[in-house]
Amino acid sequence: MTVLTSAARDSSVVAWRNLVTIKRNPDLLFGAVVNPIIFVLLFAYVFAGSLGGDGYRHFLVAGVFVQTVAFNSAFTTLGLTNDLTKGMIDRFRSLPMSRLAVILGRTASDLVVSAVTLVIMTLAGLVVGWRIEGGPLDAVLGYLLLLLFAFAMSWVGGWIGLLCRSVEVAQSAGLIWLFPVSFIASVFVSAQTLPGPLRAFGEWNPISAVADTTRRLFGNPIQPPGIPPATGWVAEHAGLYAVGTSLLIIAIFLPLALARYRKVAS
């Protein structure tokens, strides 16, 4: 218990240090705030007319929420790579602190960034006509699921960040894999409309499960207008699959990130 308490205390200090950095350099939030707003406005006003109007807008917003918190894992990648290249990891290693604290502090601070992003995106969604039609408790559960998934994806980003040797490489590595993973999913379109193997990948993609579960909790349409309801195990157990895969991602990438940190800090 003493080890866990020490790790939690050290992690909170590192997380606060990261948040203070954002406070002093608010332009670091630019990508986390502006990009999702652009996605919401672009698809809500440019494409909604040909994809189902208001019905598509209600389908769209929860998907953009999921895509955005997944993309925020790139901030974890960049943050750890930046600390690594500037020698901060060496300074942390010289201190009597938990080795888990550096990565956990980074993922915790980026979770706060994701929470702020969700608040801003909710306001943007309300502007374009999106509404939460479900109950207050379901809405809270929807946001908690989004934050759980954001936390899980941060561990993936943290592992990638510790693999990169420069910030330039991290900028590409942190995002390049997210584009196909997030677009081959039920974010902007239904996975049922994808061809061949892409459909199977989209249906089993955790991003699809989190998006569909969030839509259900928000009381929004599960499919765009004109698309029949999805069938299959994932569609019928989307909530269980969303939570399970989020926990599985943490269980896999937390030890991988910690092992990589021990290697680069040795």
Image (cartoon, grey):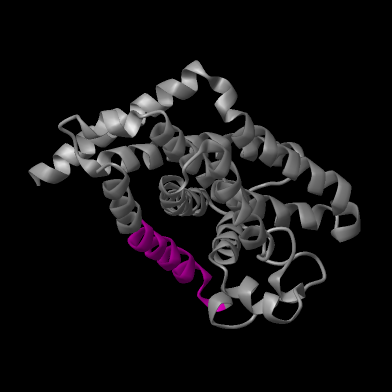
Q: Quadrant of residue 28?
A: top right
Q: Up-down: is 239 above or below 129?
A: below
State the residue in front, 13 or 171.
171
Percent coordinates x, y for residue 32 in the rendering: 60, 36
Q: Going by the picture, which residue comes out furthest to the right?
A: 50
Percent coordinates x, y for residue 202 in the rendering: 64, 71
- The quarter of the image holding the C terminus is top left
Q: Up-down: is 200 above or below 254?
A: below
Q: Going by the picture, which residue comes out furthest to the left?
A: 2
Residue 118, visible in the rendered structure: yes
Percent coordinates x, y for residue 213 in the rendering: 55, 63
Magenta residue check for 244 = yes
Percent coordinates x, y for residue 228 in the rendering: 75, 76
Determine whether, in the image, residue 226 is placed left or right of residue 12. Answer: right
Q: Up-down: is 5 above or below 154?
A: above
Determine whether, in the image, residue 197 is placed left or right of residue 146. Answer: right
> Residue at 57% of width from left, 29% of height from top?
29
> Residue at 73% of width from left, 58% of height from top?
188
Q: Up-down: is 97 above or below 49?
A: above
Residue 230, visible in the rendered structure: no
> Residue at 81% of width from left, 52% of height from top?
54
> Residue at 50% of width from left, 51% of height from top?
146
Determine the main secondary structure of the stretch shown in magenta.
helix
Determine whether, in the image, residue 29 is placed left or right of residue 4. Answer: right
